[in-house]
Amino acid sequence: MEQIASDSRRAFFLRVLAPGEDLASPFDGEPYAALVWATTRRVPAAQKQRIATVLIASGCRYVVCGGVESESWEEAADDAYLAQDLPEPVPDEQFVMTSSHRGEPEDEVAHFFVHATGMHSDFARSLVLLIGADDGVQARLAAAVREEVEASASG
């Protein structure tokens, strides 16, 4: 996992997963936001669910989905959240937001990710999770997140 951007409040990290590879808990249970961007359709539903379950169980409280099959990634995150069998009403610290950005380019999704999750002061770290290696997408996504972080810090 590499740090791709930071400001005075948050650090953004990039992790690339190959199809078939499982995700380890990234931030030791601290609340965080994740941008999940898939570059391939070769991810079985069971793997999507395993990744989403790790995200939610490890403290992810905002999941932004983009790229290929973004709706099914959002659905997997919603299912992982609902599978927790939480009390009613759900405590604020356990509530999870999700969004899907079908057909939107990297820079628009990065803008939403940085700014929508920026209002949560308890997200000291954020994860950009790229599913499937694609150097072009990786470079564009990292650059877009960096640009948005720099813009929000200056502005």
Image (tube, helix red, strand yellow):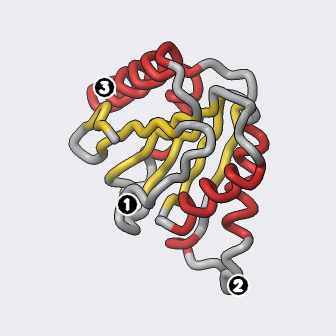
Name the one closer to the observer, 119 or 137: 137
Q: Is residue 153 visible?
A: yes
Say which label, 2 or 3, has the lower sequence index.
Answer: 2
Q: Quadrant of the N terminus?
A: top left
Say which label, 2 or 1, has the lower sequence index.
Answer: 2
Q: Is residue 24 shown left or right of residue 154? A: right
What's the distance in space between the residues labelled 2 and 3, CA to CA?
A: 39 Å
Q: Is residue 92 shown left or right of residue 66? A: left
Report the amino acid beneath label 2. Answer: Glu
Q: Is residue 115 visible?
A: no
Say which label, 1 or 3, has the lower sequence index.
Answer: 1
Element assignment for label 2: loop
Q: Pointer 2 and pointer 1: residues touching (CB < 8 Å)?
A: no
Residue 123 spot, x, y in % from top left: 39, 55
Q: Which residue is mark 3?
A: 150
Report the amino acid beneath label 1. Answer: Asp
Mark carried by residue 88: 2
Q: Is residue 59 above or below residue 148?
A: below
Among the 4 quarters of the image, the one containing residue 104: top right
Element assignment for label 3: helix
Q: How many marks?
A: 3
Report the amino acid beneath label 3. Answer: Glu
Q: Which residue is mark 1?
A: 122
Residue 15 spot, x, y in % from top left: 42, 39
Among the 4 quarters of the image, the one containing residue 83: bottom right
Q: Is residue 56 shown left or right of residue 115? A: right
